[in-house]
Amino acid sequence: MISLQIIVNRLNSICPLNGQSVRLRQMARQTKKNKPQVLVRGLQRGLQVLRVLNTKSHASALEISRTTGLPRTTVYRLLDTLIEAGYVKIGNRPEEYCLAVGVCTLSDGYKEKAWLSGIAEPVITALGNDIVWPVDIATFDVDAMTIRYTTHSYSPLSLEQGVPGMRVPVLSTAIGRAYLAFCPEAERQLIIENLASGSTPDSELAQDAKAVKKIIAKVQRLGYGYRIGGILPKIGSNAVPVRQHIQVRASINMHFILSAISLDEAVKRYLQPLRQAAGKIETELSSAAKAIDLS
């Protein structure tokens, strides 16, 4: 039979060891806590490239290199990898890159306006090359239309400097009227109420219910938005909506110089190309939505 003293002695011999084990575990945890994080530089650099492309409609490797501070050879390797992964694509101009539709699979929170621009850009570019007059695509954003892509920068007939990210009024522009007239009724009422209670260029007009109703009714009857003068008195504009199911995702418009062509002539010549471009974008939006389960 083992005596009580033997048991006590054994416990005394074990306890220091257990205490040491506890201290060792505590030290290990503290060391792990204080250990510097091991970061994957390649991933960080790839995200830098995506951030640059997210703020620009397109950019060259040189522009990305200058913005990020990364060597151009590194930027090229990152772009090749991102293209292979489906997150970046080659733009419409030589040596330019832009975001691809695959970016929207990275997060449910990815803004559909960004992938709308990616899908629409080649269509808008082709339309601009075809009709020569400058063309924009814009989406509604809180209380204004935001230009997502434009051909103003290279259209020889452009008299203004429209740029991606530029915000323009809703009620007093063709591109805004095309959106407002064809979006769902409930959305339209909320937009008008918001404009009427705000302090935007549209606020005074939005408070005139009869005038707004007249504008909306005429655009719906015609099937397109238009504006003579407005922001620039020498410019006219025609616009059509881009739809997806019952929603309006964006509007496309073209600008023309009133001294060169009348509104009626602009409608006769260019309304059909505008509608065809909108139809192409709608088809690609539908295909993209099915592919990434966004519909």
Image (cartoon, rainbow, N blue to C red):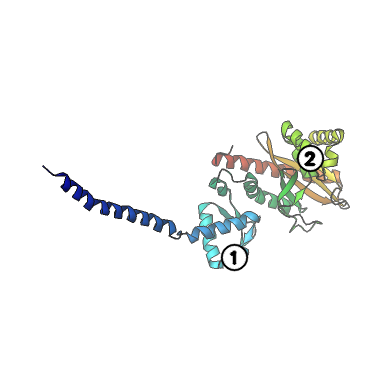
Is the C-beta separation of discs 2 and 1 under 8 Å? no
Name the residue at 28% across, 51% down. 18
Residue 237: horizontal and vertical position, in percent?
A: 81, 47
Residue identifier under label 1:
65
Within 10 angstroms of label 2, few (less than 14), some, or many (20 or more) residues? many
Q: Position of residue 123 (x, y in %)?
A: 67, 49
Q: Secondary structure at mark 1?
A: helix
Above or below: residue 29 compared with residue 288: below
Residue found farthest to the front: 5
- Quarter holding the C terminus? top right
Observer able to see residue 244: yes
Q: Is residue 164 left or right of residue 104?
A: right
Relative depth, front residue between 7 and 228: 7
| Secondary element at tag 2 | helix
Which residue: 17% across, 47% down?
5
* Residue 155 to residue 171: above or below: below
Numbered mark located on residue 257 in the image: none
Kindly identify which residue carries mark 2. Answer: 195
Name the residue located 51 percent from the left edge and 62 percent from the top edge: 77
Identity, as a three-letter code, of the amino acid under mark 1: Ser
Q: What count of labels does the image hold?
A: 2
Work out whether residue 65 or residue 204 is closer to the camera in this orientation and state it. 204
Q: Position of residue 289 (x, y in %)?
A: 58, 40
Q: Quadrant of the N terminus?
A: top left
- Kind of residue at disc 2: Leu
